Image (spheres, rainbow, N blue to C red):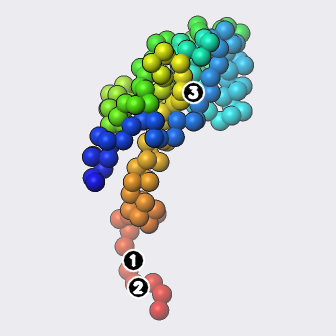
Amino acid sequence: MSLEQDLQAEIVGHLDLSLYLTVEGGTQVKDVLKRMREQRRNCVLVTNGGRLLGIFTERDVLRKVVNHPETWDSPLVTVMTAMPHTVRSDDLVAQAIDLMNSGHFRNMPVVDREGKVTGNLTQYAIIQFLCDHFPQEVYNLPPDPDQTANARDGA
């Protein structure tokens, strides 16, 4: 199968969706930033009883929090991106990639039919999928693919 056919056949649920944090909407911004730092995550999914309310990403930190210290003690719902685009685990990977590309998203919350968070589709998960699809081509690349040797290496 070609890559395009694989992307059209593969569902989002088969990718690694485990790289995410969830927090309740009333959590203070400073506490969320601390958790993001500690767990080395670039976003958190904001929930209320497990249902997705919004997403809070590094972009939100830069645009809404960094130059506004008064927001640090505010609830996260005041600075999150509400009602983000989502996908379900049974959606096709190709559709998810198109949505992420058109919206310039690095993270896409994955929810079930009731709106409860089941994962987070990241750029890393998609890159890992591509690497798994082309292991020899990806893992055997030289550091500089355009570099050629002037002399034969070895005996």
Do the residues under discs 2 and 3 have CB atoms within 8 angstroms? no
- The answer to whether 142 is drawn above or below residue 41 in the figure is below
Tag 1: amino acid:
Ala
Q: In which quarter of the image is residue 27?
A: top right
- The mark found on residue 100 in the picture is none
Tag 2: amino acid:
Arg
Percent coordinates x, y for residue 5 in the rendering: 27, 46
Percent coordinates x, y for residue 19 in the rendering: 58, 35
- Give the residue at the far bottom of this rendering: 155
Mark 2 or 3, nearer chain start? 3
Do the residues under discs 2 and 1 have CB atoms within 8 angstroms? yes
Residue ID at (62%, 12%): 49
Q: In which quarter of the image is residue 41?
A: top right
Percent coordinates x, y for residue 68 in the rendering: 62, 12
Can residue 101 be seen by looking at this rendering? no
Categorize mark 2 by other alpha carbons within 10 Å: few (<14), some (14-19), many (20+): few
Mark 2 to mark 1 CA distance (whole Å): 7 Å
- Residue annotated with mark 2: 152
- Residue annotated with mark 3: 43
Categorize mark 1 by other alpha carbons within 10 Å: few (<14), some (14-19), many (20+): few
Which of labels 3 and 1 is toward the front?
3
Tag 3: amino acid:
Cys
The N terminus appears in which quarter of the rendering?
bottom left
Residue ID at (44%, 54%): 132
- Residue annotated with mark 1: 149
Mark 2 to mark 3 CA distance (whole Å): 48 Å
Most foreground residue, 10 or 71: 10
